[in-house]
Image (tube, rainbow, N blue to C red):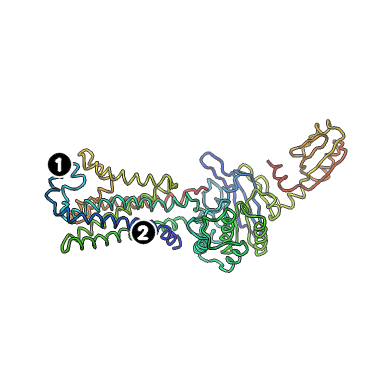
Amino acid sequence: MAVFLRELSRNSKALVIWTVVMVLICVFLMTFFPTVSEQADELDQLMQQYPEELVSAFNMDRLKMSDPIGFFGTEAYLFMTLFGSVYAMILFSGFLAREESEKTVEFLLSKPHNRAGILTSKLLAGVFCITIFNAVYGAANFILMESYVPGEYGQKELLLLIIAPYIMHLAFGFLAAMISVFIPRTRSVYPISIGIVLGSYFLSIASTLTENGEFLKYFSFFKYIDAADIVENLGFSTIYSILFAACSVVFIGIAYFFYIRKDIHA
Amino acid sequence: MSIIKTENLTKFYGKNRGICDVGLDVPKGLIYGFIGPNGAGKSTTIRILLSFVRPTSGKAEIFGMDCQKNGREVRKRIGYIPAEVNFYDDMTVSGILRYAGKLYGNYNQELTNRLCDLFEVEKNKKVRALSTGNKKKIAIIQAFMHEPELLIMDEPTGGLDPIMKNNFFELLKEEKKKGTTIFFSSHVLGEVQRICDRVAIIKEGSILKVEDVDELSEAKFKRVRILFKENKKALGFSSDLAGEVDIKGSMVTALFEGDVREIMNEILRHDPDNVWIEEPDLEEIFLNYY
């Protein structure tokens, strides 16, 4: 419990900043919705001038900007998936990497706690922070949607589009925790983490742009929670859900296996 | 009863030697010095005892329990002072002590306060504002606060001023009276001589000698200065009983190992003009092994 509370306290400032920034982005984006909605025809014409693949890559062929959920799915959703994943990676990779980089790990490991327990406390602190981050973001978006679109706007779709990034953030977080077991220096692990998120995002775009690259979708978490797919099917794809769960279990399993056994150097 | 026991303890970092076949037997209630120069393997041994690193082979036990398998149980009863102290920069001194206390689960608040007074610690200061010496004081307090049965110390006095060093040594004496076992790793030999009952000398990863400090410094070694009538005789001086020989003019200085009669006979064989026999300090004995 002590390690869990310590991590919450240590990461609380960053959590507040990331959450406030994400909510402000959503507020800012939603102020455009009434204008975008009114100019739906002009926007459609504008979209037709872009290459089909590009429009498809950003889901603008299946999600309409004039529709509240379509607007959310192409705008706020993109920011939340991308920035939220960067936050999750930085947060989770920092748990172990900061202890080793700042050489506080000896202080911690000389106390009567086993490494599995320490890692569990740190991962739980990460899950807690990501949950708060997504919950506040989700609540803010429901409030925004209620204020801008009174009545029926697709509450279930919005809920699904709020849950989906949460699952992805956790998967990225577990990946980051695993990486930080092997690269325990913040100077190295942070750029690698951000690079993985951006790489994964561009992989999802690439998988849409070319037919040959379709198989790439399995290597990008962003494709697992494609907003248009979720809205069309009113749910998550079974295969992607299994992949998310499997990846998370593998990442966590590898992190535990190697962290328990690794040598901690001065 | 052995508090620390290692057998054939070996650690290789890839192809690089850490320690090789280290065997230690630290009895209860002793202040046990562990000396050797930088890179000899002192810290590697300590890191295995605290299960920071896993041994390549061999056995390490504390309180009769395997250090790796029962690490949590073992560390409950250990206080550790590292050579290089690092705490969380964003915390205050009292925050660090509270956190350490929570990690131990149980600690003596009264003792902690007494130690804070003894070491003149400013509890409200942020860790990032502390000097090396002040950080060391916090490391000492957090190692003692849960009244451990074994204290493992890696260069514990680094950064402390002479008054605080003195306070620290008084504290060690108090702990010894209580029956606490102290494993004291250092290369400050004067401190080891002052405080330790027994000493293990480690060289290039292997234990070279284990001896009671009194025996090591008094019984077996003598610093001998021999004056010859002629420089030529001094220059030609050599003896199997002597370590490194220092020759200045007609004066020869060397550390001899062996029985005093044996040493005297050996010296007289060289027909000296005058002889001075003195007790060496631990530093000289230590250097003799290197």
Q: Secondary structure at mark 1?
A: loop
The chain identifier of the residue carrying mark 1 reads: A
Q: Quadrant of residue A131?
A: bottom left
- Residue drawn 56% across the image and 64% down it: B146
**Where residue B55 appears, x then y in whole percent?**
53, 47
User: Which of these two is toward me, B179 or A155?
Assistant: A155
The single residue placed furthest to the bottom in the displayed view is: B110
Q: Reply above or below: B32 against B243.
A: below
User: Which of these two is toward me, A81 or A249?
Assistant: A81
**Where residue B48 appears, x then y in whole percent?**
55, 50
Amino acid type of disc 2?
Val
Q: Left or right of B279: which side holds A8?
A: left
Which quadrant is home to the C terminus of chain B? top right
Which residue is under mark 1? A49
User: Badge 2 local density, few (<14 within 10 Å), some, or many (20+)?
Assistant: some
Q: Does residue A233 show up?
A: yes
The chain identifier of the residue carrying mark 2 reads: A
Amino acid type of disc 1?
Gln
The mark nearer the N terminus, 2 or 1, is 2
**Where residue B251 appears, x then y in whole percent?**
82, 37
**Where residue B143 appears, x then y in whole percent?**
57, 59
* Marks 2/1: CA–CA distance: 41 Å
Q: Secondary structure at mark 2?
A: helix
- Residue drawn 70% across the image and 45% down it: B286
Q: Left or right of B289: which side holds A27?
A: left
Which residue is under mark 2? A16
Which quadrant is home to the N terminus of chain B? bottom right
Q: Quadrant of residue B284?
A: top right
Residue B200 is marked as none
Q: Reply above or below: A190 against B138.
A: above
